Amino acid sequence: MTEMNSANVPTPIDTTSAEDEAYYLASSWQLMRRKFLKHKLAIVGGLILVIFYVVGPVLAGFFATTDSFLRHRSFVFAPPQAIRVWHEGRPRLPFVYGLDPSRDPETLRRLYAINKTLVYPIQFFVRGTEYKLLGLFKTDRHFMGVAEGTMFLFGTDELGRDMYSRTVRGARVSLTIGLFGVTISFVLGLLLGGISGYFGGAPDMLIQRIIEFLISIPSIPLWMTLAAAVPVAWPPLRTYFMITVILSIVGWTGLARVVRGKLLQLREEDYVMAARVYGASDGRIIGRHLLPGFMSYLVVHLTLAVPGMILGETALSFIGVGLRAPVISWGVQLQQAQNVRTIALHPWLLLPALFVVITVLCYNFLGDGLRDAADPFK
Amino acid sequence: MASYIVRRLIYMVILLLALSVVTFALIELPPGDYATTFVETMRQRGVILDQDAIDSLVERFGLGQPLYQKYLRWFGDLLRGDMGDSFQYNVAVTRLIGERLALTVSLSLATLFLAYGIAIPIGVYSATRQYSIGDYTFTILGFIGLATPNFLLALILMFFTFKFFGWSVGGLFSPDFLLAPWSPAKFLDLVKHLPVPLIVIGTAGTAGLIRIMRGTLLDELGKQYVVTARVKGLHESRLRIKYPIRMAINPLVSTVGYILPEIISGETLVAIVLSLPTVGPLLLTALLNQDQFLAGSLILMLGALGIIGTMVSDMLLVVVDPRIRFEVRG
């Protein structure tokens, strides 16, 4: 650090202002935070992700407007009901218009007409279907909803289930599978990459060949094959866990390469030699002296690895070899949107895809911001 | 150079052997086998098979043998060009996958060339006009391209073409040509159907390549040799093509090794959505029906494509980058 500073700042030390002093005294993490906060896109991405995680995985029951399995039999494939603030030429508190279901006498297609006489005002903290808050407390309060009538913000699916509530619930699986997958990849990558980079020799050779092998095999066919081997009869939680493991099988390779490269570079440093001379064990050198040196790179890499996992789960569930109903995930929801006629008639079935794209975009922005922040040469 | 190529080839053969073991393990992984699945489906249809019939089924497909024997038998047949029979279709696997595999290879290669053909000029444009409107446009498009999974892109494109043009974009051939023998007219029909799959499969890869090209070229453009050349009065376009662009293309070539498996991977998925007559949909049904030999052969072929592609890219890199070339020779 001192070398760099003296190279960048030719001014004598006694003229430094308080501001400069704060800069020079800041720890590397503080510097990173400062650089990160300048990256507007990354902050926006991060905030959107926080909102997604709170609305979906953490408080899904609260933010859903109704039970995600409830079938509204007279509202199958109902189009989304827009939130409106204008009624009969006058502004009004948010409400939705009711729908009049009917059938086309010739094609027997379901038709829904907006009935402007049915006004359902949206209420906040409204009573609705019962659920368990945070999985602990039984309650029936929802963030918003209508006291009477229906409110399908994203329309309904082929069984008349509310797409909005299902998308919120689906976020639970879709958003967490990436995090768990990355955790497994992290452990594997750290362990195998660490062995490879620190010890070198035969273990390095073997691990590198395994990585090259895994990277050169197309991942989707590999995932498909593994996922298809998961028995259909398994309980949802076990399937969820297996799919996570399957996604991590390819995921750890990239991380292991980063870890290895950094270790190879750092183990030649003088301070490592000093620690070794001092009699520190391998474990202590790795954990105490080497790991902190590239922790920031790992965080960046992990952030950028999450979207791949989310996309993987969505793809597998979509083609029917990943998670299956009754589990709700964005990929499972998209299963209904497989043929073009269905999509053309009911385009709102594609809405979960929008959330997949937004999530992946946000992770990419966040990862980019973190990368710039972690790069000491920028 | 020659010894390097020989070493690489030997290494490739070892990888392919490993692939065959992994593939075999994968297709043996699901509990039960085709016989049990078959008995179960027949039972659901109300047909109870007697033990003799089951035994003959097991006998016919060699399902009862120990694992290593099954592998050796499978691998031996493989070397003789026999991939076994498909349980579902009751024909030799080689007959089933021949044309589909050829289409997969051509489609993947076409996508690969398209991706590089688009990415290099755009990357150069973005880097030389950094922070211009064009650069921002391509950056944003690239981000969205990276974030949209290609099967979703396929769905969205299908939706829009259906909605606005009223035609469905699935498949690679019109119904008239589907079973027709190859002819110039059939080829023309194929060309007409190609754009949508090519765009869909290539988007993510192209977006990634543009970012790499832009990033490395920006790094190179800031280096001193570029300034030196400029000071010496070299014309700007000549300077760029001769030095920094050439330098920036090296890392791009080294990406072929992982872009190709990615394209094959994406192709598998897109083919399922757009119902292209390539190996993707076949693999899916084979997996779902536990059609072991068919699934195994397909995974083997796709994996081999990836491995061979990686090797080719390594050798290409030796040709492109003189530094590696000399290192190899020395």
Image (cartoon, grey):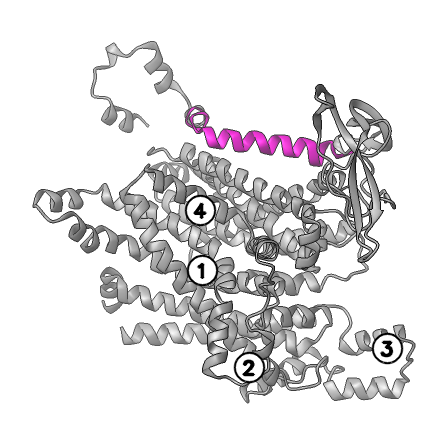
B83 is higher (above) or lower (below) than A319: below
Secondary structure under tag 2 reads: helix
Measured Cα–Cα span from mark 1 to mark 2 = 25 Å
Q: Mark 2 or 4 closer to N-term?
A: 2
B28 is higher (above) or lower (below) than B53: above
Q: For the residues carrying marks 4 and 3, which lies nearer the camera in this image? A: 4
Q: Position of residue B186 (x, y in %)?
A: 50, 79
Using the rendered image, report if marks 3 and 2 lie on a common chain.
Answer: yes
**Label 1: which residue?**
B258
Task: Locate the C terminus of chain A by quadrant.
Answer: top left
Q: For the residues carrying marks 4 and 1, which lies nearer the camera in this image? A: 4
Task: Tell me the amino acid under the disc marked 1.
Answer: Tyr
Q: Is residue B48 visible?
A: yes
Q: For the residues carrying marks 1 and 2, which lies nearer the camera in this image? A: 2
Horizontal arrangement in the rendering, residue B311 relative to residue B146 (left or right): left
Q: Is residue A218 visible?
A: no
Instruction: Check if residue A53 falls in the magenta segment.
Output: yes
**Label 2: which residue?**
B98
- Labels 4 and 1 touching (C-beta < 8 A): no
User: In the image shown, does A172 or B140 lie closer to the viewer?
Assistant: B140
Q: Residues within 10 Å of mark 1 (few under 14, many from 20)?
A: many
**What's the magenta region?**
A34-62
Secondary structure under tag 1 reads: helix
**Label 4: which residue?**
B142
User: In the image shown, does B197 or B293 lie closer to the viewer?
Assistant: B197
Measured Cα–Cα span from mark 4 to mark 1 = 18 Å
Task: Locate the N terminus of chain A by quadrant.
Answer: top left
Q: Mark 1 or 3 closer to N-term?
A: 3
Secondary structure under tag 4 reads: helix
Secondary structure under tag 3 reads: helix
Q: Mark 4 or 1 closer to N-term?
A: 4
Q: For the residues carrying marks 2 and 4, which lies nearer the camera in this image? A: 4
